[in-house]
Image (cartoon, grey):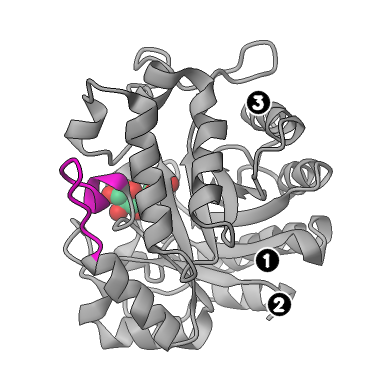
């Protein structure tokens, strides 16, 4: 294929919604047949990998990485520094935060060194709000929709370059991404991410690219806005990776069944997004495209929105949906 095609997979003891791939041969078969990269949906996040200070629990993630490599599948690793799915000891840490972050980032990145091709180093550092065309750094809960960042509160925005330097020192071979959602609409949040990228590049911080999560709707954002957003990252010389693609077909909760017409609409939507990627990102800056799950039955979206959305490429029986043709048509 011309770039990585990836999928997030549930694995290990962690998953509140889906059984781990290690217990599901039929899911393994689909992943092996259709994808050449996977991301652990949860088990490399800090809550799972350092649940108690100094107690690193790598076994589930190691099993997944071994399975992937045995099957010629690459690993994209997610995520080193994030305000969510953090263990409570970390969130409430009273000591030196820079040292605590260094221990986490260095230990985890070093552990997987040589076995993962890339890392989401920092995830979701910005708010969605818009202040003079820019979004603010995620700070207090009040400003951040109930999810402020302890990283920002304790270290200010410098936690971002520091995290990249630590990750690079631990694993100089891995590509390092800044990852966020709602940046594919060419709005204030993308402007802030680009301004941050300028600062990091000016300071020679080892960042390779921007991860666009892309939890999008069937009708938002426009393919044109998505293409423009990719192009703005490319213009900085940074890679573009689509890290968590899914397409909500029922964002307003008013569609009760997944009709043939919706399946066709979704196929065209997947197709226009993949086309926007290939049209705007030159081969040397393509970090790949990952869908956030394989089967609709395993998607996080219904748990998040409270209703069915049929966002992925395979139905609940792991059969291909028309959407997969939309992807294949543009590869
Ligand atoms: C989600 C997982 O899919 C769920 O299983 C979990 O309960 C919550 O996190 N942005 C991210 C991902 O970067 O880590 C999130 O994954 C989805 C939003």
326 over 231 or under it: above or below: below
**Viewer-proximal residue among 178 and 276:** 178
Identify the residue position indicated by label 3 in the image. 192
Q: CA distance from mark 1 to mark 3?
A: 28 Å
- Give x and y (percent) for residue 151: 39, 26
Question: Element under label 3?
Answer: helix
Q: Residue at x 35, y 79 (%)?
A: 66
Dot 2 falls on a residue whose secondary structure is helix
User: Residue 131: x percent and y percent?
Assistant: 62, 12
Q: What's drawn in magenta, residue-wise?
A: 46-58
Looking at the image, tell me whether mark 3 or mark 2 is earlier in sequence order: 3
Specify few, some or many for label 3: CA neighbours under 10 Å numbering under 14, 14-19, or 20 or more.
many
Specify whether residue 213 is in view. no
**Quadrant (top left, top right, bottom left, bottom right) of the C terminus:** bottom right
- In the rendered structure, the answer to whether residue 298 lies left or right of residue 205 reads left
As for residue 261 lying within the magenta part, the answer is no
Q: Is residue 52 magenta?
A: yes
**Residue 144 x, y percent position in the rendering:** 41, 20
Q: Earlier in the sequence, mark 2 or mark 1?
A: 1
Residue 280 falls in which quadrant of the image?
Answer: bottom right
Residue occupied by mark 1:
271
Residue 251 appears left or right of 146: right
In front here: 54 or 195? 54
Q: Do labels 2 and 1 touch, CB within 8 Å?
A: yes
Q: CA distance from mark 2 to mark 1?
A: 7 Å
Report the residue at 39% width, 28% height from top: 98
**Residue 329: image tag:** 2
Tell me which numbered mark, 1 or 3, is placed earlier along the sequence.
Answer: 3
User: Would you call the spot at circle 2 few (<14 residues within 10 Å), some (14-19), or many (20 or more)?
Assistant: some
Residue 324: x and y, percent? 56, 75
């Amino acid at each position: 294929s011309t770039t990585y095609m990836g999928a997030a997979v549930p694995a290990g003891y962690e998953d509140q919604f889906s059984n781990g791939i290690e217990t599901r041969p039929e899911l393994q078969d689909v992943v092996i047949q259709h994808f050449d990269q996977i991301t652990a949906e949860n088990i490399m996040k800090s809550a799972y990998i350092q649940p108690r200070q100094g107690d690193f629990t790598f076994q589930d993630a190691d099993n997944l990485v071994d399975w992937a490599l045995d099957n010629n599948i690459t690993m994209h690793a997610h995520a080193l520094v994030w305000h969510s799915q953090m263990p409570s000891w970390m969130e409430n840490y009273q000591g030196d935060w820079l040292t605590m972050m260094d221990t986490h980032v260095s230990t985890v990145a070093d552990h997987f060194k040589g076995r993962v091709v890339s890392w989401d180093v920092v995830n979701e550092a910005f708010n969605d709000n818009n202040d003079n065309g820019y979004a603010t750094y995620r700070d207090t809960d009040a400003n951040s929709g109930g999810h402020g960042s302890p990283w920002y509160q304790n270290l200010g925005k410098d936690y971002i370059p520091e995290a990249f330097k630590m990750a690079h020192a631990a694993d100089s071979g891995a590509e390092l991404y800044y990852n966020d959602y709602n940046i594919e609409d060419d709005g204030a949040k993308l402007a802030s991410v680009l301004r941050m990228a300028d600062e990091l590049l000016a300071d020679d911080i080892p960042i390779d690219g921007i991860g666009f999560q892309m939890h999008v709707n069937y009708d938002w954002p426009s393919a044109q806005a998505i293409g423009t957003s990719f192009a703005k990252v490319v213009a900085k010389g940074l890679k573009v990776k689509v890290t968590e693609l899914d397409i909500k077909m029922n964002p307003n909760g008013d569609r009760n069944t997944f009709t043939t017409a919706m399946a066709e609409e979704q196929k065209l939507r997947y197709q226009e997004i993949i086309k926007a990627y290939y049209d705007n990102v030159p081969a040397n800056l393509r970090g790949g495209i990952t869908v956030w799950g394989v089967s609709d039955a395993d998607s996080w979206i219904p748990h998040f929105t409270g209703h069915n959305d049929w966002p992925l490429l395979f139905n609940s029986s792991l059969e291909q949906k028309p959407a997969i043709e939309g992807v294949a048509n543009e590869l």
